[in-house]
Image (cartoon, rainbow, N blue to C red):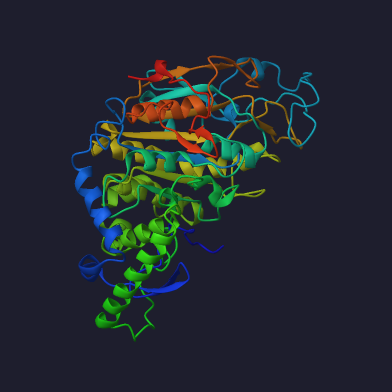
């Protein structure tokens, strides 16, 4: 798979060539860039914004009320985590294992429901809160007293594509801004050297919907997620020039920048309503600064042996990659990235949480990918004092059925699933909501992605009903026309 950033957020920079609005652009080092810039107006606007950011209460105090959270790390489990095999213990499911229950013909997404199936994994009560957790999460179980569980999450869809869009953007269809984009748009960057919104997909591939999950939709495209692949020799493609380019001199670069600035200004003057050029210019300006910042961020050799051992960064394959991504998530938020999304599982029929065929053999490997590093991330954030203003969100697009499929697999279930939150502003060791006796449908205190994001925005000092953008005659927002702050889980 070709790892590359998309239009408006591509980072092809530094002594290399790229096309902007049909013209050739040549880039310089950071000093030359600051001396001349890609566009006089764009650079002056950027610097003015950076200066004002130091005084703007929206960055530290919140847009509408005092913020408790400055940064978010979202762990997204691609494919649909099975709640009754992880966090949602149901004694009745244990007792009625093997029985057939009529739930209607439309209960499942891809097949006819079989008999009830208890979890094949051993349940244990963990922490002072007594949270039930199966043995697929032995490390995460050690931190349940730091978490608030949403035990009755629901989705409008039990199909991966729409459900993933819904859980990331608040809408079932493509074309809408993702949560990270809304937060970037509302609050801007905490640092001038790194993007506000960074995405680290599974090393094995992009999730369902590809980059649509990280899109800025109709917001200015500079707020799209910047995907990086830390497992690649070049985590951010083309950040540094090719070793084979010998003909770019400092003088030629300066001449090219001057010409480019004039061309960009003329282009922008003729298209005042088009944000794409401005977003592209800003992305290149940011990329020039990232030439200095990014290598340090990705240099995990700076971390201690204890940290590497805690995260499991030396584990082989995708497990080690996810471990390094979690460690990098801490390093990103430590350096001012607003929203970091870490994905577990690629799109497709395998290597994810979509366990249709065999729960006993398919769930443990993907759970093992996240268990140790997510627990280490919580430990690390707490040890560094980052837990006080960072929110960790652990979620998926939907749950799975309590009935068998294909023998010992489980089908998609939008009726109920589990999400947990930990960190700033969260009441630790609590749960909210309850599913039915089999964990088939949410029953009490149901919550949705709208409530989840209303709560996240609230913690970041944003009233979700006030954060809106008029698009095609409609005032759009992340929570659509829904959503309530989940106050029982707030500290």
Find the residue positioned furthest to the top: 444
Q: Position of residue 16 (x, y in %)?
A: 38, 75
Seen from the viewer's position, the closer of residues 267 and 489 is 267
Find the residue positioned furthest to the front: 270
Residue in the image at 71% along x and 21% along y: 97
Quadrant containing the C terminus is top left
**490 to 269, vertically: above or below:** above
Residue 68 in view in this figure: yes
Q: Quadrant of residue 234?
A: bottom left
Residue in the image at 57% along x and 51% along y: 210
* Horizontal arrangement in the rendering, residue 491 relative to residue 445 (left or right): left
Seen from the viewer's position, the closer of residues 247 and 345 is 247
Q: Position of residue 333 (x, y in %)?
A: 31, 44
**243 to 343, vertically: above or below:** below
Q: Quadrant of residue 183?
A: top left
Residue 372 in view in this figure: no
């Amino acid at each position: 798979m070709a790892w590359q950033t998309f239009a408006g957020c591509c980072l092809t920079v530094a002594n290399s060539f790229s096309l902007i609005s049909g013209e050739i652009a040549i880039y310089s080092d950071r000093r030359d860039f600051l001396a001349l810039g890609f566009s006089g107006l764009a650079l002056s606007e950027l610097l003015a914004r950076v200066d004002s950011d130091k005084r703007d209460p929206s960055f530290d105090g919140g847009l509408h009320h005092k913020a408790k959270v400055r940064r978010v790390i979202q762990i997204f489990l691609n494919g649909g985590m099975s709640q009754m095999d992880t966090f949602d213990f149901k004694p009745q499911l244990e007792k009625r294992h093997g029985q057939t229950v009529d739930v209607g013909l439309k209960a499942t997404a891809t097949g006819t429901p079989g008999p009830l199936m208890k979890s094949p994994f051993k349940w244990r009560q963990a922490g002072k809160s007594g949270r039930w957790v199966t043995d697929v999460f032995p490390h995460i179980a050690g931190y349940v007293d730091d978490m608030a569980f949403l035990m009755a999450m629901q989705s409008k869809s039990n199909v991966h594509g729409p459900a993933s869009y819904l859980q990331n953007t608040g809408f079932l269809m493509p074309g809408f801004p993702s949560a990270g984009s809304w937060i970037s748009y509302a609050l801007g960057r905490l640092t001038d050297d790194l993007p506000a919104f960074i995405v680290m997909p599974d090393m094995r591939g992009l999730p369902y919907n590809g980059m649509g999950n990280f899109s800025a939709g109709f917001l200015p495209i500079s707020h799209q997620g910047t995907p990086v692949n830390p497992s690649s020799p070049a985590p951010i493609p083309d950040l540094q020039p090719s070793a084979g380019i010998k003909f770019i001199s400092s003088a030629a670069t300066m001449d090219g920048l001057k010409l480019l600035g004039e061309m960009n200004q003329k282009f922008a003057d003729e298209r005042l309503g088009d944000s794409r050029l401005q977003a592209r210019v800003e992305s290149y300006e940011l990329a020039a600064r990232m030439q200095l910042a990014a290598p340090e961020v990705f240099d995990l050799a700076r971390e201690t042996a204890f940290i590497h051992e805690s995260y499991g960064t030396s584990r082989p394959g995708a497990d080690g990659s996810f471990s390094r991504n979690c460690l990098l998530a801490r390093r990103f938020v430590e350096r001012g990235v607003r929203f970091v999304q870490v994905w577990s599982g690629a799109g497709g029929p395998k290597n994810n949480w979509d366990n249709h065929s065999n729960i006993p053999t398919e769930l443990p490997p993907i759970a093992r990918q996240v268990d140790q590093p997510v627990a280490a991330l919580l430990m690390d954030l707490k040890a560094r004092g980052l837990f006080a203003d960072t929110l960790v969100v652990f979620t998926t697009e939907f749950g799975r059925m309590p009935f068998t499929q294909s023998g010992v697999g489980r089908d998609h279930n939008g009726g109920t699933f589990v999400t947990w939150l930990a960190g700033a502003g969260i009441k630790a060791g609590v749960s909210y909501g309850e599913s039915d006796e089999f964990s088939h449908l949410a029953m009490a205190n149901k919550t949705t992605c709208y409530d989840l994001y209303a709560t996240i925005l609230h913690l970041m000092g944003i009233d979700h009903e006030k954060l809106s953008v008029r698009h095609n005659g409609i005032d759009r927002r992340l929570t659509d026309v829904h959503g309530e702050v989940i106050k029982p889980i707030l500290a």
